[in-house]
Amino acid sequence: MHTLPQSQNQYLDLNSIKELPESYTWTSLQDDCTDCLATDTESLSIIDLNDPDVLALVRHACKTWGVLQIRNHGISLKLLENMEAAASKLFSLPMEQKLKVSPSSTNDTSGYRLPTISPFFPKLMWREGFTIFGSPVEHALKLWPHDSKSFCDLVEEYKEEMKKLAGRLMWLMLESLGITEVDIDWAGREGKSGGEAVIQLNSYPVCPDPDRAMGLAAHTDSSLLTILHQNKTSGLQIFKEGTGWLTVQPQTGVLVVNIGDLMHILSNGLYPTVLHRALVNGKQQRISVAYIYGPPANVHISPLPKLVDQYHLCLYRPVTWSEYLELKSKHFRDTLSVIRIAGTPNVF
Ligand SMILES: C=C1C[C@]23C[C@H]1CC[C@H]2[C@@]12CCC[C@@](C)(C(=O)O1)[C@H]2[C@@H]3C(=O)O
Ligand SMILES: O=C(O)CCC(=O)C(=O)O
Ligand SMILES: [Fe+2]
């Protein structure tokens, strides 16, 4: 881990800096294989969730890319645009206002803060983030003492709609692996899957030196799946083994769904978690809203028994979501290997 120059630099106002400070200069991106950009011929297709072949399409995308792009998902464009506008409004507040909702302890994961992966990098990221765990009321009151209701109502509506979609997507993924309701006790259909979620608002301000800066360094999400809305500005890239970094171009109304580490575990590695990152640019601010969906707090996630046999050994030990997050904050990229077991034909 790195000791960041946090105290003096953590909350520089990126929206007004004219020259890239040294603490934000990523001289070597080689670790993440920046040179291996994918050719334009490979591109992610967009899945229409009403397509009669949806299971086969989901299975193919999950296996080969670890990412889906979806349309006809039932989330209105209005809601996506309103959430994007709310994020934009939040990040355009004066720094002193945003600092009022910045957690004082690093263990506190809500509010205006650096990404949890920051300590693993020697340089800071050209990004602002606001994390919503549970109710946004307390923070919203501090940000907008006279008008917090519209933000809170919007967040609640977003959560409600996204939760339905996330449950549906999780079931498409499970079904496409041959899993049915009898194989899994916590993930009932029709709202019974009491999954939990975190909303992550990201802003990547216009950058004076975009080629030497990093918006959000390469990582995988510690979720079952993450549903991402991005504004019209591109920046999101996914990494595919043997291909390299591929830009996921924003398209109106299209949502990006990432496979997270917990789906990787649940599927015993059949649906691999996807490495991704966000680049910045010198022309436009980029906004993204991530709905990070996980299992209910008390559930232990381990490979589904149906996906384990003598040829497909059980690869991971059981973990709850909070145990996993705790491990991730210590081990970052090595977390999946830390919970990996030698491989047994038995299931927990
Ligand atoms: C529930 C989560 C998931 C977290 C940690 C915690 C709250 C904030 C999430 C993110 C959001 C930004 C990328 C990431 C990599 C980060 O640094 O903070 C994510 C991380 C993870 O997916 O591991
Ligand atoms: O901004 C993006 O496109 C990526 C955001 C992301 O990966 C995250 O919030 O976990
Ligand atoms: Fe992510």
Image: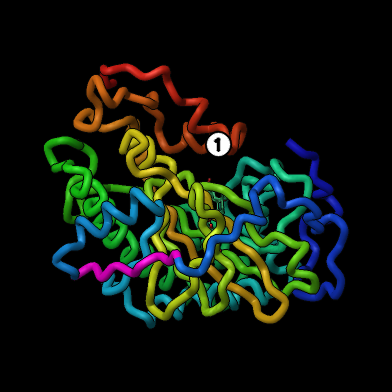
| Residue corresponding to mark 1 | 328
Q: Establish whether ligand 1 lies closer than 8 Å to the Cβ of label 1.
A: yes
The image position of residue 242, as x and y in percent, is 50, 49
Q: Main secondary structure of the magenta part?
A: loop
Q: Residue at x 79, y 70 (%)?
A: 209
* Residue 212 in sight from this viewpoint: yes
Extent of the magenta region: 42-50
The image position of residue 7, as x and y in percent, is 83, 50
* Residue 156 in sight from this viewpoint: no
Quarter of the image containing the N terminus?
top right
Q: Residue at x 86, y 54 (%)?
A: 8
Amino acid type, callout 1: Lys
Q: Residue at x 77, y 51 (%)?
A: 28
> 57 above or below 267?
below
> 16 above or below 44?
below
Q: Secondary structure at mark 1?
A: helix
- Queried whether the magenta region covers residue 19, the answer comes back as no
The image position of residue 266, as x and y in percent, is 32, 37
